[in-house]
């Protein structure tokens, strides 16, 4: 199991095939960082992923002028051709191989990032693992993809699992992959997957954990840390398409999901409808801004689940936690280093954690997911607000600004 792009694309990191050594390395790395920062937290041994290869449900490639598909060399725009990625589902690279021949045969225009000329910038594939649905997204430097009708027909004929094909328009002179505008070329513009017995609609820009089976274990652990009696009012911050918030809504009284990606919020609203959940609401807003506004209103919140981007949370967000005084905060992170930084800040403002649980969401890479449960210390509980608000007031008019 050797990758020709080892340590070049920013993906695979370990040359040794021994998966247990990978888990040990990641655990020891996080433990050393915790000790270095003086954080009094027990780091538990990393939990193994059910799949060590072929686990990614999302893949993005670019094509060179020879129509070879490949991944970018880390921190450059240099395309490194490959045939099979150890982390991709086989069907993804099968589709890329087909497109390589098809694009070459019909001489499709390939985008040159240095000259900002050409048509096809990237191809994105997303997979719904349980339902076996596939989405193909052509990211182009124009609003028209000539020959798209025939291309779609050939793709669907060759790969029946493809349920939708989308043209994403990105005419910006930046390395950002996706643009903000989508045109549906085939299907409904989304695929539907199942996670923890719920159904989730996934669009091109939506955030969805890339390792489905390990995500089930991660979310199961996160919710098991909470003490729930069914009366809790909860916030799911940085909620994406609403996955963990909807799972929580099955056990809590009310959940508000907060996400600044408008398309993800649209998917989340659809997902709640699909799953017939009436006790969850979604707000399109920056999580820090929303929490700060919520704190100003002195709302009563019992639980906050936060899953910020790799850069971590913000002091504004964490200060709002201090003012809202929820009894329990579950912090899920895809970067334990920024999480450790935030945990130190939480400690300053009276929120403590004793344990950090590691879940290997990204086998073969140097990344790992971590979870902590935080709660207010005795002083924090004594300062608990006497607010008796029974629900979230005026939500539609106050926070649906965007």
Image (cartoon, rainbow, N blue to C red):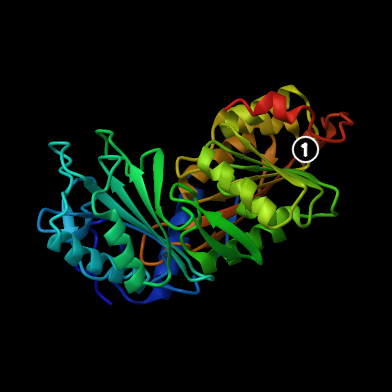
181 up-or-down from 289: above or below: below
110 up-or-down from 91: above or below: above
Q: Residue at x 66, y 67 (%)?
A: 197
Q: Which residue is label 1 attached to?
A: 301
Closer to the camera, 347 or 193? 193
Q: Residue at x 10, y 58 (%)?
A: 66
Can residue 14 be seen? Answer: no
Q: Is residue 362 left or right of residue 154?
A: right
The secondary structure type at the circle numbered 1 is: loop
Closer to the camera, 20 or 50? 50
Q: Is residue 277 left or right of residue 289?
A: right
Closer to the camera, 289 or 202? 202
Can residue 80 be seen? Answer: yes
- Residue 350 x/y as whole percent: 69, 35
Quadrant for residue 282, please give it.
top right
166 up-or-down from 113: above or below: below
How many numbered discs? 1
Crowding at dot 1, Cα within 10 Å, few <14 / some 14-19 / many 20+, comes out as many
Q: Residue at x 34, y 72 (%)?
A: 157
Quarter of the N terminus within the rendering: bottom left
Q: Residue at x 76, y 23 (%)?
A: 297
Q: Is residue 131 left or right of residue 377?
A: left
- Residue 98 x/y as whole percent: 24, 68
């Amino acid at each position: 199991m050797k990758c020709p792009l080892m340590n070049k694309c920013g993906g695979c990191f370990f040359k040794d095939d021994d998966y247990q050594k990978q888990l040990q390395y990641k655990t020891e790395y996080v433990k050393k960082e915790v000790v270095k920062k003086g954080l009094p937290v027990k780091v538990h041994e990393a939990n193994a992923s059910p799949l060590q290869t072929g686990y990614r449900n999302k893949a993005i490639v670019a094509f060179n002028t020879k129509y070879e598909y490949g991944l970018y060399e880390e921190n450059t725009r240099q395309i490194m051709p490959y045939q099979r990625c150890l982390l991709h589902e086989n069907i993804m690279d099968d589709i890329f191989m087909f497109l390589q021949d098809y694009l070459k045969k019909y001489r499709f225009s390939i985008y040159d990032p240095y000259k900002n000329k050409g048509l096809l910038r990237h191809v994105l594939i997303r997979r719904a693992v349980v339902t076996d649905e596939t989405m193909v997204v052509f990211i182009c430097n124009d609003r028209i993809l000539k020959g798209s009708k025939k291309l779609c027909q050939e793709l669907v004929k060759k790969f029946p699992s493809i349920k939708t094909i989308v043209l994403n328009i990105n005419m910006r002179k930046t390395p950002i992959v996706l643009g903000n505008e989508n045109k549906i070329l085939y299907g409904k513009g989304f695929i539907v997957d199942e996670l923890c017995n719920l159904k989730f609609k996934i669009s091109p820009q939506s955030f969805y954990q890339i390792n489905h089976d390990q995500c089930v274990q991660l979310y199961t652990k996160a919710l098991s840390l909470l003490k729930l009696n069914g009366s809790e009012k909860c916030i799911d911050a940085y909620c994406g398409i609403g996955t963990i918030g909807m799972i929580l809504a099955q056990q809590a009284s009310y959940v508000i999901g907060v996400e600044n990606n408008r398309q993800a919020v649209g998917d989340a609203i659809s997902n709640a409808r699909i799953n017939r959940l009436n006790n969850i609401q979604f707000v399109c807003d920056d999580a820090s801004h929303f929490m700060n506004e919520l704190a100003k209103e002195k709302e009563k919140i019992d639980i906050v689940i936060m899953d910020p981007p790799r850069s971590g949370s913000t002091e504004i967000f964490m200060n709002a936690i201090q003012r809202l005084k929820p009894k329990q905060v579950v912090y899920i992170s895809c970067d334990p280093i920024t999480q450790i930084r935030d945990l130190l800040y939480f400690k300053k403002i009276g929120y403590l954690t004793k344990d950090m649980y590691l879940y290997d969401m990204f086998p073969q890479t140097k990344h790992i997911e971590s979870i902590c449960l935080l709660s207010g210390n005795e002083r924090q509980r004594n300062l608990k607000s006497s607010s008796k608000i029974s629900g979230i007031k005026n939500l539609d008019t106050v926070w649906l600004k965007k």
